[in-house]
């Protein structure tokens, strides 16, 4: 009998949340929130967050089947 896989999706969600705090709340936000970076930078960061959440959700769905 095959042992069950370790559910890593919850840990990935916590890592994604920590990255959200790092990029949008901490002093790191001062590095990318400059006029020289352009107006698209926050949108691109949010796109990365959304893609990461979609990948976590997709991975979680594949574990259920």
Image (cartoon, rainbow, N blue to C red):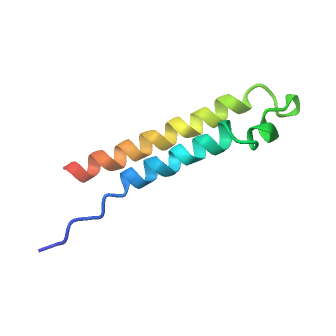
In the rendering, at what x and y percent does residue 33 appear? 79, 33
- Which residue shows up at 43% across the image and 45% down it? 55
Side (left or right) of 55 relative to 22: left
* Vertical relation: 14 (above or below) 25: below
Q: Residue furthest front?
A: 26
Q: Quadrant of residue 53?
A: top left
Question: Looking at the picture, does residue 29 appear above or below residue 59?
Answer: above
Relative to residue 65, is residue 31 depicted above or below? above
Q: Is residue 45 left or right of residue 38?
A: left
The residue drawn where x is 51% and y is 51% is 15
Q: Position of residue 49 (x, y in %)?
A: 55, 38
The quadrant the N terminus occupies is bottom left
Question: Residue pushed farthest top?
Answer: 39
- The residue positioned 76% from the left and 42% from the top of the image is 27
Query: Residue 45: horizontal and vertical position, in percent?
Result: 64, 36
Q: Is residue 12 left or right of residue 61?
A: right
Height in image: 5 above or below 15? below
């Amino acid at each position: 009998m095959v042992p069950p896989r370790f559910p890593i999706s919850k840990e990935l969600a916590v890592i994604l949340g920590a990255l959200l705090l790092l990029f949008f709340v901490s002093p790191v936000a001062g590095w990318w929130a400059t006029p020289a970076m352009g107006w698209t930078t926050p949108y691109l960061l949010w796109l990365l967050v959304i893609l990461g959440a979609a990948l976590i959700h997709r991975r979680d769905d594949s574990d259920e089947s």
